[in-house]
Image: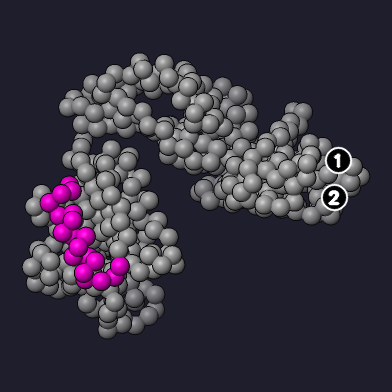
Amino acid sequence: MRARIITIGDEILNGQTLDSNSQWISLKMAELSVQVVEATAIADTKEAIVKALDESVGKYDWIFMTGGLGPTKDDITKLTLADYFQSEMVFVQEAWDHIVELFEKRGRPVAKANKGQADVPEKSTYLPNRAGTAPGMLFEEKGSRLVSMPGVPYEMKYIMRHHILPKVEEEIKGKIINRHFRTVGIPESILADRLEDFEESLPEFIRMAYLPSPGQVKLRLTARGENGENLKEALDHAEKELRKDLGNDLAGNTEAQLAHIVGELLKASGKTLSVAESCTGGSIGQALVAEAGASAFFEGGVIAYSYAAKSDILGVNPETIKTEGAVSESVVKAMAEGVRDKFKSDFALATSGVAGPEGGTEDKPVGTVWMAMAGDFETVAVQHHFFKNRKLNIELTVVSALDMLRRKLVSEQEVIV
């Protein structure tokens, strides 16, 4: 099955808005093993839209189009589609009732321009959008399904999740099965070498894909065939062998974020966590509280960026900072112990590093990071040497610190998640 993504918007072409819609749709299609052949951003003009349609209709199984469905005059997608498919507009009362209800809940009057959003081309299937005012539309022409959706990401996702993904899943049900896994702390090339024998042992109808991100590599096993039961049985065996090969380097078998995995392990153990952050500036705490239920295990954190904050709040000896530097084993251990004592938590993580792009020395170049973990054991600290990119260094530090705790929790519980 082949697909194309078309995003409409001058704001994307001039760099004002990032095209996160294409990325999200591509990820969802990859999960379903639908091949996205092309993703294109085009201008808000009838000519550009028609050209994209001519290049797509009849050539792709699915065409995902986002943008240009707002209430203003520059939103021309719907009118262009109606003209292209030679379809009259019809008023959808259900869509209008929803728009009125949405505005009433917000205590705002309905704008005159919004009424046009309840019109859809007669040849399309109306796709209710409970997340916004612009409904989605599904056209079927020359063997292609074209779905037009709002450009607002959460509205697009609503329509995809409630109307489109179930259709795609139904088409491939029993013929394609995916399993997703996450590894942490192993570079993609080393992981590939390590899993070479495993990959060679896979039957022809199972393929493995590597999806790297900073500090992590996701693995996807995809089985294709006509017999769903046989595919599942083969994947079960492959997963068992993969777990055997990777052990605790395998951080999970879902698409859950690492912070979620750590949180689930903490909740399962009944343990709590606090954090002391310097170079990460609160990013570890942010990752943890982004997951629902964090209050069950996360006590709190301290962003101790200055020398004074490390000393006054966390109790780090000023002389240690003076003699060994803030980016050192002794200081990061003291930070972890200090924040654990302050919050009375079972575990504590601490980070201190030279995030960059400036501030490095010969002994501690940019990318040097120390992190520590404290608990009812001797505090442990690890040094990493990352890169010269500040944002990347912070992201890698968060991943590495959380994985340090994950491995400790897994070893204590004697489980592999």
Residue, far right: 319
For mark 1, what is the residue? 324
- Kindly identify the amino acid type of the residue bearing the numbered disc 1: Glu
115 on left or right of 377: left
Residue 56 vs residue 304, the one in the foreground: 56
For image coordinates 32% across by 23% down, the residue present is 235
> Which amino acid, mark 2?
Ser
**Outermost residue, front side:** 362
Q: Name the residue under label 2.
A: 311
Q: Is residue 43 left or right of residue 391?
A: left
Residue located at (53% from left, 41% from top): 214
Location of residue 85 in the rendering, given as x and y in whole percent from the top left corner? 10, 64
How has the structure been colored for display? Answer: one colour
Q: Where does the image place residue 79, in percent across and percent down from the top left?
A: 18, 72
Q: At numbered mark 2, what does the secondary structure look like: helix, strand or loop?
A: helix
Which residue is at 15% across, 55% downward?
57
The location of residue 340, given as percent across then percent down, is 74, 41
Which image quarter: residue 20?
A: bottom left
In the rendered image, the quadrant that contains the N terminus is: top left
Q: Which mark is residue 20?
A: none
Please determine whether, in this image, residue 191 is positioned above or below residue 259. above
**Taking 282 as reference, is 316 left or right?**
right
Callout in the foreground (1, 2): 1
C-beta proximity under 8 Å, tags 1 and 2: no
Q: Is 293 above or below relative to 137?
A: above
The residue located at (44%, 35%) in the rendering is 218
- The span shown in magenta is 43-61
